Image: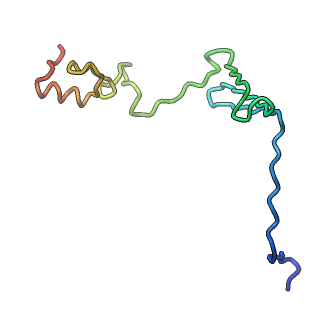
Amino acid sequence: MSENKKETRGRKPEPEQLVMPDKYTRVFESKDGIKRIWKYDSTITKLGPVSCETIYPNSKDDIAQPQLPKNERSSKSGKTLKTLQKYLNPLNNKMVSYNRYKMLIKEGIIKEKG
């Protein structure tokens, strides 16, 4: 037998128990620069954090602006694309997509603007 081989016979050793401290803090930082601090205290509650603190960047320039997916961006003229707009359905007063709006016009349920 080689000396590097581990012994596999017998009972497996029990895994060590992870001992969490009574008080600890977790810090979460998002891509836009917002920092969240969660404070835990198991003597008060074991179900969740005792307090949460949110720290925002100093100015709007520090906050990273999320990039919209290509299909949600506005056109070159700055107007929102028709296919991304929502329209009011007069039958039930709910907002519908562009395609549904065009179908309602085609069926004669609503009149086209303009």
**Along the line of sight, the residue nearer the viewer: 24 or 87:** 24
Residue 96 place in picture, x, y as percent: 28, 26
How many numbered tags mark residues here? 0
Q: Residue at x 30, y 28 (%)?
A: 83
Quarter of the figure with the C terminus: top left
Residue 90 place in picture, x, y as percent: 21, 18
Instruction: Tell me how the rendering is colored.
Output: rainbow
Residue 72 versus residue 92 in the image, above or below:
below
Q: Is residue 73 left or right of residue 9?
A: left
**Along the line of sight, the residue nearer the viewer: 18 or 44:** 44
Q: Quadrant of residue 25?
A: top right
Residue 3 place in picture, x, y as percent: 88, 80
Q: Residue at x 11, y 24 (%)?
A: 108
Residue 97 versus residue 1 in the image, above or below:
above
Q: Residue at x 67, y 19 (%)?
A: 56
Residue 61 place in picture, x, y as percent: 62, 18
Q: Is residue 76 left or right of residue 67?
A: left
Q: Residue furthest bottom?
A: 1
**Along the line of sight, the residue nearer the viewer: 95 or 18:** 18
Residue 10 versus residue 103 in the image, above or below:
below
Q: Is residue 88 left or right of residue 76?
A: left
Quarter of the figure with the N terminus: bottom right
Q: Quadrant of residue 29?
A: top right
Q: Residue furthest left?
A: 108
